[in-house]
Amino acid sequence: MLALACGDAGTTSAGSTGDGSSSSTTAVSTTGKPDTTTTGEPTPTTGGSHSASASSSGDPGSSTGAVSATDPGDTSTTASSTGDSSSSASTGAPQCDPPLTLCAGACVDLDFDADNCGDCGSTCADDQVCVLGQCESLACEPNAVSDCYSGPLDTAGVGLCAAGQRVCNEFGTDFGPCEGEVLPAPESCDTPDDDDCDGKSNEGCYLANCLAIKLADPDAPDGPYAIDLDGDDGQLQPFQVQCDMTIAGGGWTRFNWLHTDYTAGQDPLGQILPDCKISDLQCRGRIPAGPVTGLLVKDLTDKAHAVWTFNNSIISNAVLGALQSKQEYCNANQGAFQPTISTSVEAYCGNGLEGGCDSFFYTSGACKGVGNWGIHWDGDNAWCAAAFKMGATFGGCGSQGDQGFLNECACDDEQGELYYR
């Protein structure tokens, strides 16, 4: 049935029973401005009820609808639409959890993103990385390991000096510390190593002789010391010698000695001092090159000694020339060259026997026909009254291996040592 009233646009109603029939009523009201109201009043049914209501304001884009339910199976819905299309639903933009930041629709870390370093759109160059929001230049491959050495380049691999290793950090911006490298250090005299890595060991540690050691350390005791005959720049390596730091002020360097029977036929000055070890029973050494002022002769058998100061006399020069330069000599009665100190109680040339120590020979065998190597310093070039004798001697003993120190006339019976200063 349709009924029209003055001013009404029209009303429609419909109803439904619980068995599936429906009832609906529609009313349209028009006033001074467009307005439409729709009302529905549902009739309860056993299967549940549904109610919907919609209203429209004068704005064409506005409507309201409601749905209600009277039992747990029912639903109720209300929808509203406005002209600006606003909605309570999500807009669809990503949500970024700290420390990430939304840049151009993506979540980025401004501390480490090279395309957004410190701020969205702030881009680092190709040879840079972003570290804590700053563009940093690449220095190395991240986590790469390389050799390193912070000392002078010409010392690496010399002496104790050696390269170490360093690791590039995880960003590639810098290397960590150089670990394990050994750098030059002050030279230590307590080890044989090249501590300062200049290719030389213990330079400045060794002096040239026992006298230099004594002058450097007046309290230095008797004993073995290392010396360097030609200094830091020479070819000879340091070696040990025995020093007497007591007799006549000390500073005496041992260069020739017999702690056993002399070996017949050997040159008594046939070795250089660096060839002898201080533990050797016999050393046929000679005085190294350089200034020499004195000679010390020790009679080990009788525990006596005597000291001579070279004085440029004929016998003084002959003795020094042989002991230092292997100059052969053969002459007698050339003026006595006497000791300044003598503790021997034997009657020998140093105590005035045979007119004093005025005769000397050092020969390979020709002097007085002795026939073999020998050295002998006494008062007449025979076997008695010797300041020292080693090897072949003339008359008396007639031995190719005679030996004696501060000795009267005995043959082959004493051991002794020679020192220079």
Image (cartoon, rainbow, N blue to C red):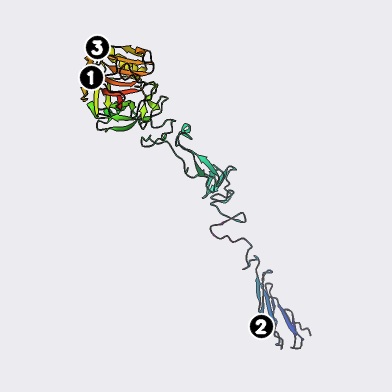
Q: Which mark is residue 335?
A: 3
CA separation in Å, label 3 and label 2: 151 Å
Q: Nearer the viewer, mark 1 or mark 2?
A: 1
User: Which residue sits furthest right?
Assistant: 1
Quadrant including the C terminus: top left
User: Mark 1 sits on what residue?
Assistant: 350
Percent x, y of residue 76: 66, 79
Residue closer to the observer: 57 or 140: 140
Residue under the image location 30 percent in, 20 percent down: 292
Q: Is residue 421 visible?
A: no
User: Which is in the foreground here, disc 3 or disc 2?
Assistant: 3
Q: Nearer the viewer, residue 333 or 136?
A: 333
- Residue 365 versus residue 192 in the image, above or below: above
Query: Which span of residues is magenta-colored?
Result: 93-101
For the N terminus, give its image quadrant: bottom right
Disc number for residue 148: none
